[in-house]
C-alpha cells in the first residue's frame, strides 16, 4: 500500500485521509496550525484557534451530496456529527407556496442533510482522524518545500521537507492546504510551471452573525435561504445545536453598505426584510464577522494533456475555491476526497503520469462543472447589483446558460419536478449544465417561465437601505 502525505487538516484533507487509511494506505497529515483538536464542538466554536483558515467561523453548509458521502463512506463520522448536534435540514421543506403538487416522491430523501458550523464539523473529523489506524496527524508542522526528482523528463514530487529540516518521503503528496495553498510558490521555486490558473475576485463582502435559539426551535424559511434583495443578498443557514447564521453580502465597491460591519446597522437591515426578520429572535453568539477579498480560483497542473508535475494531487479548495454564498466548499471537498480514494485505488499503481492524467480527468468531469456554474452565477448577480446601484434595470442575459437560469428561477414556482431539479443543483447532486442539457428541458423551462414574473423578495428599497445605514 502507498505512503501518502496529506498537507492540511481541514475537512477535505481529514476526510480524504480517513478514506485512504481505510483502504490500507499509510497517511501522514501535516497541519501548520498547532492547536490540538478540542474535546467538544462547544470548545471548538469558542476556543479553537485556526489562524490558517480565514473562513473558519464564517457561515458553512454541508449540502445533501456531502452528507451522502459521509453516510455511505464514513458512516461513523456521520453518526458522530449527528451526536455532536448537527441539524437535520430537509431542503424540500422550501417548496414554494405556489406549488399545488406537494406529493412526496420515492427518492426525496436525497435532499436531506445534517449540517453544522465549520468548527464543530472539523472537530468531529479531527477526532475520527486521531483514532484512525493508519493516520498520523502532526499539528504545528509547517512544510518548507517539495522534494523532487525528474521522472522521464517530468518533475516528480517524492516528498516534502518541513521547517525543522526533516524530510518525509511519499508515494503521493496531496495538497489540501485550501485557499492559501503554497503549492504554486513551491513549484515556481523549483522552476516548474507556471500552472494554469484562473482567478478573479468574486466581488463580494460578507457580513455574518451567528445566533442560538432561545427555545430550542429553528426559525422557518419564508423565503429562499439565499435571497437577492436589490443591491444586497441575505443567506440563512441552520447549524448545529439550535444555532444558525445570517449572512448579508454586498458588492465590494458599494462603500455605503460597508456600514453593515456595525451590529446595529446590520440588524436594522435584517429587520427591514419581512421574510427574514424573525431569524433575529435568537441570542447572538458572535459579533458581525466581516470577510472580503474572496476569490473564485481554479488551478490545473496540466499542459497539452501532460502533467506539469507528478506525485502530487490538488484537493478541494487548493484545486478550486468559489464564492461561499452557495455553501458548496465543504461538500465539494468531500466529493473530491471520495474521487481521490477511487483514483488512488484504480490508478496509483499505473505510474506517475498515468495517475496524474486520471486525477485530472476525474476532477474535470466531476468537479469542474460546479466551479464553472458558481462563477457564472457570481458574475450574473454582481452585474445585477451594479445595474441597480446605478439606478438602471439589469440587462437581460445574453448567454444561453444565464437565460435558462433566470427562466428556471421562475419555473420552479410552478412545477414540482423543475423545483426538484433546481434543488439537485443547490444540493450538489447534479450540475445544472447536465439538467439543462436533457432533451426538451430548455423548452419546458422557457414555456413555464413565459409571461410569469420572477419572484420578488420583500425588502428595503435602495433609498430606504441607504437611510437605514446613514
Image (cartoon, rainbow, N blue to C red):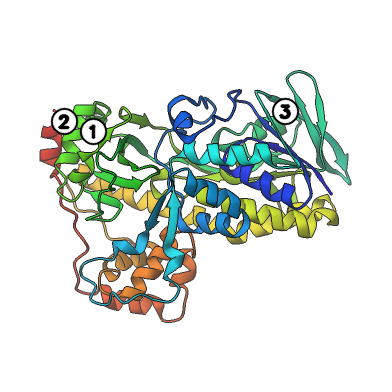
Q: From this view, report whether residue 144 is shown above or below residue 321.
A: above
Q: Position of residue 248 (x, y in %)?
A: 29, 40
> Pointer 2 and pointer 1: residues touching (CB < 8 Å)?
yes
Q: Position of residue 142 (x, y in %)?
A: 68, 24
Q: How many marks?
A: 3
Residue 189, label in figure: 3
- Which quadrant of the figure has residue 343? bottom right
Q: Secondary structure at mark 1?
A: helix
Left-right relation of 372 to 353 = left
Q: Secondary structure at mark 2?
A: helix
CA distance for labels 2 and 3: 47 Å
Mark toward the viewer: 1 or 3:
1
Q: Secondary structure at mark 3?
A: helix
- At a point 22% along the width and 33% down the height, the residue shown is 266
Residue 257, label in figure: 1
**One can see residue 299 in this view:** no
Q: Earlier in the sequence, mark 1 or mark 3?
A: 3
Left-right relation of 68 to 283 = right
Q: Position of residue 122 (x, y in %)?
A: 53, 38
> Crowding near pointer 2: few (<14 within 10 Å), some, many (20+)?
some
Observer-nearest residue: 464 or 61? 61
- At a point 38% along the width and 55% down the height, the residue shown is 89
In the picture of the structure, the residue carrying the numbered disc 2 is 469
- At a point 30% along the width and 36% down the height, the residue shown is 211
Amino acid at each position: 500500500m502507498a505512503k501518502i502525505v496529506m498537507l492540511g487538516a481541514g475537512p477535505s484533507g481529514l476526510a480524504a485521509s480517513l478514506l485512504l487509511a481505510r483502504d490500507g494506505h499509510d497517511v501522514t497529515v501535516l497541519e501548520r496550525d498547532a492547536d490540538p483538536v478540542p474535546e467538544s464542538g462547544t470548545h471548538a466554536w469558542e476556543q479553537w484557534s485556526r489562524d490558517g483558515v480565514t473562513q473558519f467561523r464564517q457561515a458553512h453548509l454541508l449540502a445533501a451530496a456531502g452528507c451522502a458521502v459521509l453516510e455511505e463512506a464514513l458512516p461513523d463520522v456521520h453518526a458522530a456529527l449527528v451526536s455532536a448536534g448537527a441539524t437535520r435540514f430537509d431542503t424540500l421543506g422550501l417548496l414554494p407556496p405556489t406549488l399545488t403538487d406537494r406529493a412526496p416522491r420515492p427518492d426525496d430523501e436525497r435532499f436531506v442533510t445534517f449540517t453544522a458550523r465549520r468548527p464543530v464539523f472539523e472537530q468531529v473529523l479531527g477526532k475520527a482522524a486521531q483514532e484512525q489506524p493508519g493516520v498520523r496527524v502532526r499539528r504545528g508542522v509547517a512544510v518548507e518545500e517539495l522534494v523532487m526528482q525528474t521522472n522521464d523528463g517530468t518533475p516528480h514530487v517524492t516528498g516534502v521537507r518541513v521547517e525543522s529540516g526533516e524530510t518525509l518521503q511519499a508515494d503521493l503528496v496531496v495538497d489540501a492546504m485550501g485557499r492559501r495553498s503554497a503549492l504554486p510558490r513551491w513549484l515556481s521555486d523549483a522552476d516548474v510551471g507556471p500552472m494554469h490558473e484562473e482567478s478573479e475576485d468574486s466581488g463580494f463582502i460578507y457580513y455574518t452573525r451567528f445566533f442560538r435559539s432561545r427555545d430550542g426551535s429553528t426559525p422557518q424559511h419564508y423565503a429562499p435561504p439565499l435571497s437577492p434583495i436589490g443591491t444586497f443578498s441575505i443567506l440563512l443557514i441552520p447549524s448545529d445545536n439550535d444555532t444558525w447564521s445570517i449572512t448579508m453580502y454586498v458588492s465590494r465597491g458599494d462603500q455605503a453598505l460597508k456600514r453593515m460591519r456595525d451590529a446595529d446597522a446590520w440588524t436594522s437591515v435584517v429587520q427591514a426584510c419581512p421574510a427574514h426578520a424573525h431569524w433575529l429572535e435568537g441570542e447572538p453568539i458572535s459579533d458581525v464577522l466581516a470577510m472580503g477579498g474572496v476569490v473564485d480560483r481554479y488551478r490545473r497542473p496540466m499542459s497539452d494533456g501532460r502533467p506539469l508535475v507528478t506525485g502530487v494531487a490538488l484537493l478541494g479548495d487548493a484545486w478550486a475555491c468559489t464564492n461561499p454564498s452557495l455553501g458548496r466548499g465543504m461538500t465539494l471537498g468531500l466529493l473530491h476526497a471520495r474521487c481521490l480514494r477511487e483514483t488512488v485505488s484504480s490508478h496509483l499503481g499505473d505510474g506517475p503520469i498515468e495517475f496524474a492524467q486520471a486525477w485530472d480527468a476525474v476532477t474535470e468531469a466531476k468537479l469542474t462543472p460546479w466551479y464553472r456554474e458558481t462563477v457564472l452565477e457570481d458574475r450574473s448577480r454582481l452585474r445585477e447589483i451594479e445595474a441597480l446601484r446605478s439606478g438602471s434595470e439589469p440587462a437581460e442575459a445574453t448567454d444561453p446558460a444565464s437565460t435558462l437560469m433566470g427562466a428556471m428561477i421562475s419555473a420552479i414556482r410552478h412545477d414540482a419536478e423543475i423545483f426538484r431539479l433546481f434543488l439537485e443543483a443547490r444540493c450538489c447532486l447534479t450540475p445544472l449544465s447536465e439538467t439543462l442539457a436533457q432533451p426538451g428541458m430548455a423548452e419546458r423551462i422557457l414555456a413555464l417561465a413565459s409571461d410569469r414574473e420572477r419572484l420578488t423578495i420583500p425588502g428595503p428599497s435602495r433609498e430606504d437601505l441607504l437611510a437605514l445605514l446613514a
